[in-house]
Amino acid sequence: MGQDKKNEMTPLMETKEITKKFPGVKALDNVSVTFYPGEVHAVVGENGAGKSTLMKVMAGAYKPDRGSILFQGEKVSFNHPVEAQQMGISIIYQEFNLLPERTVAHNIFLGREPSKFGFVNLHRLNKQANDLLIEIGVENMMTPTALVSSLSVAEQQLLEIAKAVSLDAKVLIMDEPTASLTRTEVKLLSDLISRLKAKGLAIIFISHRLSEVFDVADKITVLKDGQHVGTVKTGDVSTEDIVYMMVGRVLDHYFPPLGSLDDFGEVVLRVKGGSNDSLNNINLELRRGEVLGIAGLQGSGRTELAEALFGAIPFKSGSVELKGKPVLIKNPNRAISEKLGFVTEDRKSEGLLLMQPIYDNMLLAIRSLQNLFTFVYPDGIRQYRKLVPELGKQVDVRVDSYAKEVQDLSGGNQQKVVLSKWLASKAEIFIFDEPTRGIDVEAKARIHDIIRGLTKQGVAVLMVSSELPEIIGMSDRILVMHDGTIGGELPADSSETDIMMVATGQKLADSKSGSY
Amino acid sequence: MTTESIATKQIKKEKLTQRIPQVYYFLVIITVLGITLDQIFANGNILSSPTILLNILIRSVALGIVAVGQTFVMIGASIDLSVAYTISLTSVMTSLIMQGDPSRVPMAIGIVLLIGAFVGLINGLLITKLNVNAFIATLGTGLVIKGFLNGTFTNWSGSVPRSFQALGYDKLGPIPLSLFLLAGVVLIGWVILSWTKFGAHLYAVGGSVQIGRLSGLRTDRVIIIAHVICSITAVLSGLFIVSRLGSGAPWVGPDGVYDLESIATTVIGGTALSGGRGGVLGTLAGVLIFGVIDTVFNQLGIDTFLKTVLRGAIIILAVASYSIRSKREAA
Amino acid sequence: MSTIVNNPPAEQGTRQLKLFWNWIKKIPPVYPIFLAVAIGVSQLNPNFASTAGILAFLRRSSPLAILAMGQLFVLASGGFDLSQGSLVTLTIIGSSLIIYNNDEYTYISILIMMGMGILVGLVNGFVVSYLKVPSLIATLGMLLLLKGGGLFWTGGAPKGYLSENYRYFGRGYIENVPYFGRFPMAVIIFIAVGLILMIIFHKTNLGKQILAIGDNPQAARLSGVKVKQVRMIAFVISAIATVIAGIMIGGYGGTSMEAGEGLEMQSVSAAVIGGALLLGGKGSVPNVAFGALTLDAIVSLLNLLGLPKPYRDAVQGLIIIGAVAYAAITSRKRE
């Protein structure tokens, strides 16, 4: 590796040629990054670039297939995150590892409570906790005896950091620390980070918010498609440079051609002023035969938009019209009867009945609309005995038996089964949330073909995706979300850079933003 | 430093208001309601007669002791359906071993405590090492004990010496000894849960096994110990019961519905089925609530059977009031 | 595009063998176990293997089988129905009270008890779905409600008698049946109820949706399943099955306050032996019925081996633990 001849300090932690594969996807490919003490180092990249995986490898949650990790110059290998933790590498995930029903002090010192003969010295426990809080400067925000459930998200984050500091962390890894924080809270966090930096910790964090990255980080590492694009000093680059590094790639497959004006029909879905707890003033139109791409970074509200449209977590105000008729979609059953379909983000937890056979999964939506006492046949519902194999053919599911339990299928096949569910229910409006996440290239291409095929038949498609090539390759129009609302609309031939800019909160000179 | 004194002040304030579990307000309401009803519709004895108050407490002793143990396992997100049969087993074994002979009292107590610990150990091992659902595992061991008992003993067996019956009947001044036993068990339970490492770890494991493991806790051991504690409290409860009855029989445990009621009072007392929170003080309130209801019904001459009906309704409503607030999908 | 994976060419014989072995692997464990136990019993009591012996055995075990099949509906939806036992007791003592040896009230009492069962199921379902009380606690509360209600209604001891017409269902025979001679009414009911429940569970939309809820309530909901309503129906079906079983038990054994004691545990055990998953999402009506038969067969076996009746509880406990442990060890890990 081309060593920067830094005379100032020796690296605290290094990943050398780390490769990590998951079924169907190479999450990390030969990644080598160096982290120094007393530095704040941001790791950026789009969703799926490998940032989380890299952090997890460093924290001992994953074992790399190839490559090594060096800590303080020595090669290390972890079998369990606890080992990494004991060595001084602490990671804070987006879903905190806190016990809400226990106090701050108990959470910090879980497993290491000051005790004698088995009795916890509560006074010392609280005092130690308090000292720790003072040390990192957050003593005014929480008391050691407060229940974690009473703390705000920001405070819980600070608590997690306190925990890490108490474990004598030398490397502190944070995954999207500012995702749920307000601007003032972000300031708090960055002050704390500065203080920790001054103590010589190496702070590594993943973030999508480039403006914050530029405020806080000393160095930025860009990952793309599991590979290390480069590591730069923040002062040496601009936001555009970073965005450029994040995007721009060789397409691994070609997308089907976009729709032409003839294909687009009347507006089938119109939302005006839609809002709920996570969304704000959503205005959009969806036409027959088009693919409307929804881009945006994690936390911008894309999934919440999909859920609101489908009635899973409905809008609280605003209006929704289907084919010109105002409707109230308050639950999924209603949405399905109005011919909507929703291919969710997480097929395992939201889209599939893992223990049931393929055919039962395919027919689930149709059945929900039918009378409970309708007879079903293994390969179809009454009068539709051929339905299941037909569906299977339509989505190109590759199995030797439709009686197989869905949990035995590959990711690609599983997603196809989910898709077939909505084909079976003859949905006219399809909502996709990350349609090809975690799927191999071949299945990806097939699914894209199917989606475009749907639009040719007059189906309207709304597609949420964090894979920019997919957005650009598939969308006839692009809406970019930011902070719970629509940041702007971009035309089909937009560049990844343009999309990223709007997504990160920058304004493009020529983008339409907000309402119609 | 000013920051430090603000923090300590806040610590003190929180201590008072947070400490009292919600269920105690419910207990107060029930008691006031009960007394009022008693004044209006019955003799009004509750306030005037100390015996009645005592009876509430004594009825609560057997249930209260085993409920403390049940609280332990439920905090750990587990459950113990074998307690009723452990109680029966204790009563039978105790009177059999003692055979009315005061000198054999310590030995008998020692043996049944060991048996109880063994039962708890089996429960814990089945759940942690064989991954058997706690419901089924403890149901199973309970049935095994039940089978053994019913098969071997068909009637009252043995007897308990007068000196041992002191536990059930004697008083220290105006206060029955058994109340000291209950108070002792609750106190020890409270101390363990709030003040020991084990207690802190139990809450953690019950809240999230994963977080427990990530912090390096020996989660299996924690659960096993909780089950051992629960079975031991069942033994203590059994000892109390046999001291009052004079002899032991196989139906003693199930008759008192100690399994279901210990679960119910624990849940009413604020311990969640899903684990991670709650405590013995709340459970004690739950037990007292049942005791008050029992007594009031007696005073009002309400059919004992209607009592059972109302008990069921109360359990459902109490748990519903806790559950409605959370958004989980129940099953 | 082909959807069938082509099998590599293989020798005819080994391929047949492999298919056969795969087929054997798929047989639910409950059947071979039942067969083994049944053979054991018939060795000790040759009468058991005779037509009359088999019918007698089925006559005894029919109620438990019906209870287990009803319990399956709730288990498959991801819950527990602990109120079965006390509902059985209530059915019996309630019918006794209503009939009080007046034959003409037989059918009215049955009707009333059915209505009561439906009500119990609705309340159970309501408490679990809408009040969000875990089914363990909800049906436990219902158990107490019914127990107390029953005691209250009768004043503590069973009153009245069940008419002959009523007892016919559990105790009676159909005469002059070709080949069999006398055929127990209970077995007819068992077969009829079993068929109906089997059709509902395996062949109707309702059954599929119940499995969906038990497998993944979130995915079910997002696919349009009306989770709350479906769950309530599962409880109602369990309650109706319970009432039917109660009528049969009353017919067979007469009125008693302990008639239903512990039956819910037995039905859960039978279901587990029959391969139902405690967390929901999997189960089969015929397998569960055989689970109940297996349980009863084991009891018979133990009786014949000279083990006194109460030890059956002990063995039952061990069986339950064994069945669940076995299932836990061999089950696939879901994410």
Image (cartoon, coloured by chain):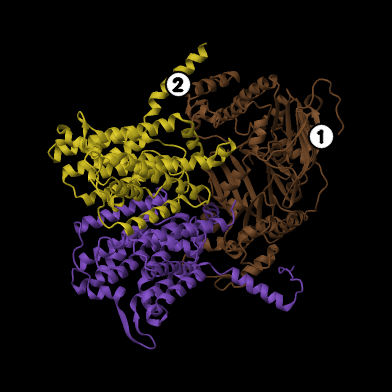
Chain colours: A brown, B yellow, C purple
Residue A175: x and y in percent read 66, 35
Image quadrant where residue C11 sits: bottom right
Q: Secondary structure at mark 2?
A: helix
Question: Mark 2 packing: few (<14 Cα in 10 Å), some, or many (20+)?
Answer: some
Contact between labelled residues 2 and 1, with CB atoms less than 8 Å apart:
no
Q: Are labels 1 and 2 on one chain?
A: no
Residue found 27% across the figure and 44% down from its top: B241
Residue bearing mark 1: A230
Q: Quadrant of the N terminus of chain A?
A: top right
Which residue is nearer to you in this view: C129 or C174? C174
Q: In this orientation, does residue B79 appear?
A: no
Residue B263: x and y in percent read 37, 45
Residue B309: x and y in percent read 27, 51
Could you tell me the amino acid type at mark 2? Answer: Ile
Q: Badge 1 sits on which subunit?
A: A
Q: Badge 2 sits on which subunit?
A: B
In the displayed structure, does residue C163 sit left or right of residue B235?
A: left
Residue bearing mark 2: B11
Query: Does residue C53 sit above or below B9 in this rendering?
Result: below
Q: In this orientation, does residue C66 appear?
A: yes
